[in-house]
């Protein structure tokens, strides 16, 4: 089974929403969401999310999330390439399903949230005639749940420090010891994270946003610390929700049925699934009008 691309974990009867899970650095489309105690993934276990959201389709998206593949070298290009691939693959999957206008809810862990933000910014800008189908991901997205994603930091040194803690938490020590280029790239990587945040900021009002932060420190080898601090993972912004999760950075997306964080996320997903269809239908009416006007203006320009 490939660990890259879109994979359907569950399909309810006549689904009204697509829930799309996106893992983070050194993550995996299944293991990231799987409890180490029960060995069950809350996304696919029949007694967990599929039992609660019987009218949803649950998808996971996998990509090359090795440290060097995401933050090494020209990290801005890597994040954009992943974002473009997510839009293309999710759009293709929904086109085959004849479900381009079905609402989308993203669930993101760590730097996976950066890719989703970049993907939504990319999709929002795809309105030219031959690529307007890529605009559908932006129009259809109703909500994004960010679990431990670094959002803040005009201070590039702080962002680089956050990126280094994420790497320390998920990467074998030998990578840090042998790949000095990677550490050099963290400064560039931190600039990329800030640029993505700046691109996403004007689009946020389109979506329901729920920020989650880790409430337990991670053993980084040389110290114990929060990988992504609360003020970065859950900025206090108008019209957004925020909550802590009683786990460390890598465990905050792995749940048992009795986990308090699980119940908070399930309640949000239920609420969003109820609200999304009417909102997205109206948004598609406006989007089609906007695209039709663009085409008409382009036709007028050609006849001048």
Image (spheres, grey):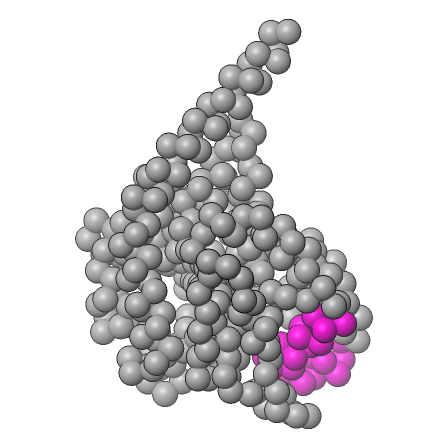
Q: Is residue 164 magenta?
A: yes
Q: Quadrant of residue 273?
A: bottom left
Residue 301 x/y as whole percent = 62, 13
Q: Is residue 26 visible from the viewing direction of this image?
A: no
- What stretch of residues is rendered in magenta? 157-179
Q: Is residue 74 above or below residue 246?
A: above
Examine the rendered structure and indicate whether residue 83 appears above or below residue 1.
above
Image quadrant occupied by the C terminus: top right
Which one is in front, 13 or 241? 241
The residue depicted at 36 percent of the width and 57 percent of the height is 19
Q: Tell me the residue at 43%/26% (across/down).
A: 289
Q: Is residue 161 visible?
A: yes
135 up-or-down from 67: above or below? above
Rendered residue at 35%/37% (across/down): 282
Report x, y in % for residue 221: 65, 92
- The residue furthest top is 304
**Residue 295 in the image: x percent, y percent?**
52, 21
Residue 180: image quadrant is bottom right
Is residue 198 highlighted in magenta?
A: no
Quadrant placement of the N terminus: bottom left
Q: Name the main secondary structure of what is drawn in magenta.
A: helix
Where is residue 192 drawn, in percent x and y?
70, 59
Numbered marks: total: 0
């Amino acid at each position: 089974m490939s660990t890259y691309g879109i994979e359907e974990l569950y399909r309810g009867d006549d689904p009204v929403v697509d829930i799309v899970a996106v893992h983070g650095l050194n993550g995996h489309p299944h293991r990231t969401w799987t409890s180490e105690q029960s060995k069950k993934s809350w996304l696919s276990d029949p007694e967990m999310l599929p039992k609660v959201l019987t009218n949803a389709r649950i998808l996971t998206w996998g990509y090359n999330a090795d440290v060097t593949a995401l933050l090494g070298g020209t990290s801005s290009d890597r994040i954009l390439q992943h974002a473009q691939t997510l839009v293309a693959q999710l759009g293709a999957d929904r086109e085959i399903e004849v479900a381009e206008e079905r609402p989308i809810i993203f669930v993101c862990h760590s730097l996976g949230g950066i890719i989703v933000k970049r993907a939504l910014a990319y999709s929002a800008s795809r309105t030219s005639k031959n690529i307007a189908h890529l605009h559908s991901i932006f129009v259809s997205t109703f909500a994004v749940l960010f679990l431990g994603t670094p959002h803040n930091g005009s201070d590039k040194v702080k962002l680089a420090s956050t990126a280094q803690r994420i790497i320390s938490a998920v990467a074998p020590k030998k990578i840090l010891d042998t790949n000095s280029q990677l550490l050099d790239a963290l400064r560039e990587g931190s600039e990329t994270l800030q640029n993505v945040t700046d691109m996403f900021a004007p689009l946020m009002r389109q979506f329901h946003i729920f920020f989650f932060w880790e409430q337990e420190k991670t053993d980084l080898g040389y110290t114990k610390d929060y990988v992504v601090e609360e003020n970065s993972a859950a900025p206090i912004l108008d019209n957004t929700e925020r909550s802590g999760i009683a786990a460390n950075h890598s465990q905050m997306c792995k749940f048992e049925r009795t986990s308090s964080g699980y119940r908070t996320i399930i309640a949000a997903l239920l609420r969003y699934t109820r609200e999304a269809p009417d909102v997205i239908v109206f948004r598609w009416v406006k989007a089609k009008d906007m695209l039709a006007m663009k085409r008409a203006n382009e036709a007028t320009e050609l006849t001048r």
